[in-house]
């Protein structure tokens, strides 16, 4: 009889390890099913000892040790992977099982006894640096390279890397943040290697995931594997290069507890596998990654550029009305005598001219907006109260009903909350003072559409946003129609820009100014990243309208000046104590206001001597409850702190803990 110690694969707050009896010899790393409370869950065997050796411990245990369930797979997880997950669990103040459960798709756990196990690399002696191509070099194993360059340059580099690794009989893995990015990367890289390139993501049918997994395992030739989101382990022992593409994109953070950053997970896991080189790549890398480069913790790969090159003519327009000298920044002198803005306008004279030019020349124009709807915010002119959601207190967005709506409300405006989705009629007075002077502010996508259709009724307009195009199929269909109509305009929010992979003649940004109102230290980087990607999309011109002309991020982005932007951003973060100079830990509680205030005060006392800055959330929740946050700042070299980790792990299940949160809001 043996006493088995297992790591439970669940995100519930349970003990880090559990013990069970079994008469079988079960190896460490095997996947088993175990009873936990009233359920049966998967678990990984982390230790196995004869009962005779631990008889005293068994007798003194304050609980009854139950019998082990079925063994699903023998030694499915490599020991190096389990050790990496233990490291990640400490960093995210959770248990190892929660990390593994977040990283491994359920379909693999359910079929672990049927499928090929993940490949375990054979450790070899260190190799000297070998030239791979003019653009990239194969370095000593287990190094990390930062690759910053335009999309075309990076794709050229990856094609060269694949050829060189295939020549060495080595496989290459690409991790991407979204399914759309994975599909696009597959299209860009598949030419010439159609039989040796595979794509995996959790939206594939279960049967197709298993078939693709087995094909990867059984292909004798070296392969290229592209994944979206999870799949940190793959059934190959010849993987040599791992690329984390679109490293600066949002979408890497696990949406559920333990809120792990998949970039960090992939890096730590692969650093424990022998003979692997990791590439962190994007058109603009994160400030945290560039800071690691500054400190020589990682090395500079190729391509690496501090200036983004574009053939597009750039124009920055000041939309503040009634100025005697309206600023116009452009790459040429043709607009030096641009018409000043008079009164509030959605479309500048320059953008109107671009719309006409686009139609006359049968080109294509993409117009970007931050928010859908008519106006991003509505305010009472009498008491200056912002109109908010009755359910969650978030500012509501003004929308227009479709004229085709068969209900009596057709064509009537309504308020919609983009946080919880609730709607109500816009026919109301101020909830605070009863005033009727409610003024919509900000520029939404629908308002831009109304303006263009009113002035240019003969132009074909297509739109992509979460209200109109709710599926990938609808987005693809809209893009195909836009491409097939010369002289047309595509209106879209961020979702459109992420699906646009081929260049567009002209790009225009009506306004990004509402983002500056968000109290989030990552906003400047988000704006810079958005503009750099749009600038890359535009082949002939990019035009940006703003009422905040003095914000340096606009000139940095339109000139492709990545180095000065990084220097300014890193200085700001150092001054205010944000990453990478401090590790942030956000504690959140949801509930009735008086209850959560008392609970947070208790947490604050429990966590002493560590300081907790307490502040309310930017919005409430869909249940009408309040949310309160507590923020801990700790020096990176002091984290993980075992004492603080233990205190955070002991918090009740209704308290969420996010280490390295993507946002403080």
Image (cartoon, grey):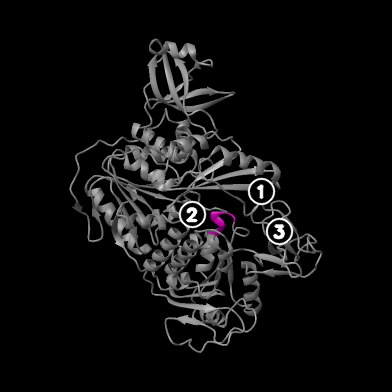
- Residue for point 24% across, 36% down: 123
| Mark 1 or mark 3, earlier in chain | 3
Q: Residues within 10 Å of mark 1 (few under 14, many from 20)?
A: some
> In the rendered image, which quarter is residue 588 located in?
top right
Q: Quadrant of residue 473?
A: bottom right
Q: Position of residue 465 (x, y in %)?
A: 59, 61
Q: Look at mark 1 in the image and give the residue it sits on.
A: 621
The answer to whether the residue labelled 1 contacts the one labelled 3, judged by CB atoms less than 8 Å apart, is: no
Q: For this view, does 177 lie left or right of residue 656?
A: left
Q: 10 Å neighbourhood of mark 3: few (<14), some, or many (≥20)? A: many
Q: Which residues are magenta?
A: 470-475
Q: Position of residue 510 (x, y in %)?
A: 56, 72
Residue identified by numbered label 3: 388
Considering every residue shown, the one lying at the far bottom of the view is 337
Can you tell which mark lies on residue 250?
Answer: 2
Return the x and y of residue 328 as percentages of the image width and height. Answer: 50, 82
């Amino acid at each position: 009889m043996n006493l088995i110690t297992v790591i439970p694969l669940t995100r519930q707050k349970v003990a880090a390890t559990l013990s069970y009896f079994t008469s079988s010899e079960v190896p460490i790393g095997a996947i088993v099913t175990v009873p936990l409370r009233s359920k049966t869950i998967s678990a990984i065997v982390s230790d196995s000892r004869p009962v005779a050796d631990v008889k005293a411990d068994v007798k003194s245990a304050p609980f009854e040790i139950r019998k082990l369930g079925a063994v699903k797979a023998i030694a499915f997880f490599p020991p190096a992977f389990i050790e990496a997950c233990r490291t990640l669990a400490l960093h995210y103040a959770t248990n190892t099982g929660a990390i593994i459960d977040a990283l491994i798709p359920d379909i693999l756990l359910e079929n672990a006894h049927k499928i090929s196990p993940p490949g375990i690399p054979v450790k070899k002696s260190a190799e000297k640096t070998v030239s791979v191509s003019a653009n990239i070099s194969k370095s000593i194993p287990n190094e990390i390279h930062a690759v910053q360059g335009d999309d075309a340059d990076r794709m050229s580099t990856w094609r060269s890397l694949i050829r060189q690794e295939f020549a060495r009989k080595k496989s290459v893995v690409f991790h991407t943040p979204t399914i759309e990015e994975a599909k696009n990367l597959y299209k860009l890289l598949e030419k010439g290697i159609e039989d040796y390139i595979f794509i995996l993501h959790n939206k594939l049918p279960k049967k197709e995931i298993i078939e693709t997994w087995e094909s990867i395992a059984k292909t004798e030739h070296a392969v290229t594997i592209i994944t979206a989101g999870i799949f940190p382990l793959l059934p190959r022992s010849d993987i040599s290069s791992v690329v984390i593409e679109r490293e600066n994109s949002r979408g890497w953070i696990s949406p559920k507890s333990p809120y792990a950053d998949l970039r960090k997970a992939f890096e730590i896991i692969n650093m424990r596998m022998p003979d692997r080189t990791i590439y962190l790549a994007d058109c603009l890398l994160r400030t945290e990654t560039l800071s690691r480069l500054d400190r020589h913790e990682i090395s500079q790969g190729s391509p690496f550029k501090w200036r983004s090159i574009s053939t597009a003519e750039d124009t920055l327009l000041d939309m503040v009305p009634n100025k005697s000298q309206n600023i116009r920044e452009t790459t040429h002198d043709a607009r030096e005598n641009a018409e000043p803005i008079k009164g509030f306008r959605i479309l500048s004279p320059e953008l109107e001219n671009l719309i006409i030019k686009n139609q006359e020349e049968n080109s294509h124009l993409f117009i970007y907006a931050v928010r859908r709807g008519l106006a991003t915010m509505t305010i009472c002119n009498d008491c200056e109260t912002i109109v908010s959601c009755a359910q969650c207190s978030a500012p509501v967005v003004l929308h227009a009903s479709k004229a085709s709506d068969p209900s009596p409300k057709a064509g009537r405006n309504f308020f919609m909350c983009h946080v919880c989705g609730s709607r109500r009629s816009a026919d109301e007075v101020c909830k605070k003072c009863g005033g009727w002077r409610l003024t919509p502010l900000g520029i939404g996508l629908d308002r831009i559409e109304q303006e263009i259709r009113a002035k240019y009724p003969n132009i074909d307009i297509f739109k992509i946003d979460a209200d109109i195009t709710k599926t990938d199929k609808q987005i693809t269909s809209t893009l195909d129609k836009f491409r097939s109509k010369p002289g047309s305009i595509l209106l879209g929010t961020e979702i459109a820009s992420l699906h646009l992979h081929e260049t567009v003649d002209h790009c225009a940004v009506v306004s990004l100014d509402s983002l500056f109102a968000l109290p989030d230290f990552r906003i400047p980087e988000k704006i810079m990243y958005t503009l750099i990607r749009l600038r890359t999309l535009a082949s002939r011109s990019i035009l940006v309208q703003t009422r905040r002309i003095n914000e340096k991020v606009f000139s940095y982005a339109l000139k492709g000046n990545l180095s000065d932007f990084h220097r300014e951003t890193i200085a700001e973060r150092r001054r205010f104590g944000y990453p990478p100079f401090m590790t942030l830990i956000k504690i959140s509680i949801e509930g009735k206001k008086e209850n959560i205030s008392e609970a947070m005060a208790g947490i604050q006392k429990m966590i002493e001597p560590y300081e907790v800055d307490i502040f309310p959330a930017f919005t409430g929740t869909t249940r009408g409850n309040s949310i309160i946050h507590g923020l801990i700042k700790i020096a990176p070299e002091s984290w993980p702190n075992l004492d603080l980790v233990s205190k955070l792990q002991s918090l009740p299940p209704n308290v969420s803990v996010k280490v390295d949160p993507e946002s403080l809001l």
